[in-house]
Image (tube, helix red, strand yellow):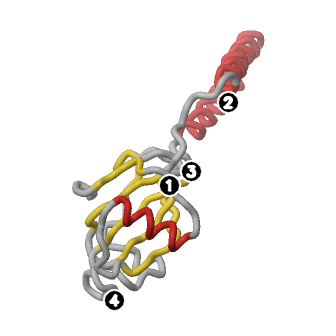
Amino acid sequence: MKSLKYLFAVVALTGALAVSAKADLMFLGAVDFANGPNSPDANRAAFEAALGFDPGALSNNFESGLSGSVTVTPGEFFVVHYGKGKGGTGSGGSLEFFKVVGGETSVTFPQFGNGSTNPDPFGHGGISSARGFGGTPLVPDSGSTVMLLGVALGSVEVLRRLILKKR
């Protein structure tokens, strides 16, 4: 019975560690689009003017097909252009700024602006473009991954010996 208890604990711990995190976008702010040009250079300049720092070089440029999740780089900044839509006060909608957080590599942008969940009164229409800047690609680290694998395999062996010893 005790071996079953240990086995259940190991399975539960493995399952808890294997569950992936929810895709996360952190809302950074929004500005009135003011019928400006909707280009990567103009979006980068608007980001820098609104938030006060350079988001880095263009890394993604989505201009269609944004109804589902898209592949992104962890830490990437996004400028998303939303149309004015019903209830929007901006001329031409808004530019909303997001950051990919939590090490995510796939996110889904809000489809109709953030007027209901974030303080963006300008654009409540659909997405016209989403442009990513910067970010840090995930690369395997040198030794800690191998060390963690060794600890996990060693723990399994210790559990196996404890279970066999009690029989």
Given the image, on which type of amino acid does mark 3 rest?
Answer: Gly
Q: What residue lies at 66% left-to-right and 33% top-to-bottom?
A: 9
Q: What residue lies at 35% left-to-right and 73% top-to-bottom?
A: 113
Left or right: 130, with 160 as reference point: left
Q: Earlier in the sequence, mark 1 or mark 4?
A: 4
How far apart are the two marked residues, 3 and 1, measured between alpha carbons? 7 Å
Residue corresponding to mark 2: 5
Whether residues under marks 3 and 1 lie with C-beta atoms below 8 angstroms apart, the answer is yes
Given the image, on which type of amino acid does mark 4 rest?
Answer: Thr
In the displayed structure, 110 sits above or below 10; it is below
Residue corresponding to mark 4: 89
How far apart are the two marked residues, 2 and 1, measured between alpha carbons? 40 Å
Q: State the quadrant of the C terminus.
A: top right
- Classify mark 3: residues with Cα within 10 Å, few (<14), some (14-19) or many (20+): some
Q: Is residue 3 visible?
A: no
Q: State the quadrant of the N terminus.
A: top right
Whether residues under marks 2 and 1 lie with C-beta atoms below 8 angstroms apart, the answer is no
Q: Is residue 82 visible?
A: yes
Left or right: 49, with 7 as reference point: left
Q: Earlier in the sequence, mark 2 or mark 1?
A: 2
Residue 65, horizontal then vertical, whole percent: 23, 54
**Which label is found at residue 100?**
1
Q: Nearer the viewer, residue 122 or 50?
A: 50
How far apart are the two marked residues, 2 and 3, measured between alpha carbons? 33 Å
Q: What residue lies at 55% left-to-right and 46% top-to-bottom?
A: 103
Residue 140, horizontal then vertical, whole percent: 58, 28
